[in-house]
Amino acid sequence: MSAVLVESGPDQGAVWHFGEPNNEQKLLAQGLAWVNLGHRAIITVGGVDRLRWLHDITTQDVENIAPNVWKPVLILDALGHIKFQFDFVDDGQISWLVIDSSYKEELIAFLNKMKFMLRVEIKDVSDEFSCIRIAGKPDGMGGPFKIVKKDDVKQPETEVGIWALEAERVAAGRARIGFETDHKSIPNELGFLNTSVHMKKGCYPGQETVAKINNLGTPPRKMVLLHLDGLNVDLPKVGDKVFDGEKEVGFIGTVVRHYELGPIGLAVVKKNVPIENILIVGGISASQEAINRL
């Protein structure tokens, strides 16, 4: 069947599905399909100081990651708010950063500003290389991934659209910047601790906020999985307000139709919202499911 493309947003131009989204999700979950992520940007960082430098400015223990092992990474501001999110791998000579194209230029400018006199070289190689989600058992962070040259993207297994990948992400409770985040978002409320945030590494920008809130207990907000009333044709949009009765308690991020769970979405709500309460978003009722990614 012909491909249906994403018309707007960070995934614009990517294949949304090939006409059978439920079957595509099943194939991806079974490890029998691949996804072309060529719409995402790829930045490389070379130089002998690259790992120490990236270790110092990110939330991940980059210095001690084995070659060719993928890890999710965040960059925070000084107050602990999330600025950037990317998937990271180092091949022993070069570090590869796979990011949403929407903030590629902003991230490159930030990295260039932060390199000072260190021996690092930053390049945008998005026109030369692509990231793909290869066939295989899901690894818990959206992969397994592989970097390939643009001419070598095609894989022998069935290609599926990013609807399948996004449905997998939402069901797993993995937040994505620009969807489940706003200007106040901190890692503690989105399930990033011990995944994108290494809790035993030393100082990095925003680390004091992360540690303080973790030691005090619960952050001011939490992310929950919403199971929406399946009778509605139109689903809520990213950023729609979430209500507990008549009280606004948060916002919704990504909403997808999952092949097993039906319509689901990730919402960020106030920490004191009882998990058993039925919430309303976009005029649709939704039950909550707690997310535990620690």
Image (tube, rainbow, N blue to C red):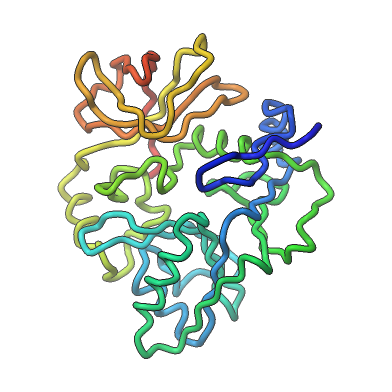
Q: Is residue 227 left or right of residue 148?
A: left
Residue at 64% x, 58% y is 131
The spot of residue 192 in percent (x, y) is 37, 49
Q: Is residue 192 left or right of residue 185?
A: right
In terms of depth relative to the viewer, which is nearer, 38 or 217? 38
Q: Quadrant of the N terminus?
A: top right
Image location (x, y in percent) of residue 27: 73, 34
> Residue 290, image x and y in percent?
36, 29
236 or 61: nearer the eye? 236
> In the picture shown, does residue 25 fall above or below 142?
above
Quadrant in which the C terminus appears: top left
Question: Which residue does the image show at 45% across and 70% down from the upper left?
Answer: 108
Whether residue 116 sits left or right of residue 233 in the image: it is left
Looking at the rendered structure, the number of numbered marks drawn on it comes to: 0
| Extreme residue toward the top, this view | 231
Q: How far from the left and from the top, in percent, is residue 234?
A: 50, 18
Please say if 136 is above or below 54.
Answer: above
The residue at the point 48 percent across, 25 percent down is: 264
Q: Is residue 213 left or right of residue 40?
A: left
In the rendered view, tell whether residue 246 sits above or below residue 97: above
Residue located at (51% from left, 32% from top): 171
Residue 61 occupies quadrant:
bottom left
Location of residue 268 (image quadrant) = top left
Q: Nearer the viewer, residue 136 or 285?
A: 285
Residue placed furthest toward the right: 156
Residue 228 appears in which quarter of the rendering?
top left
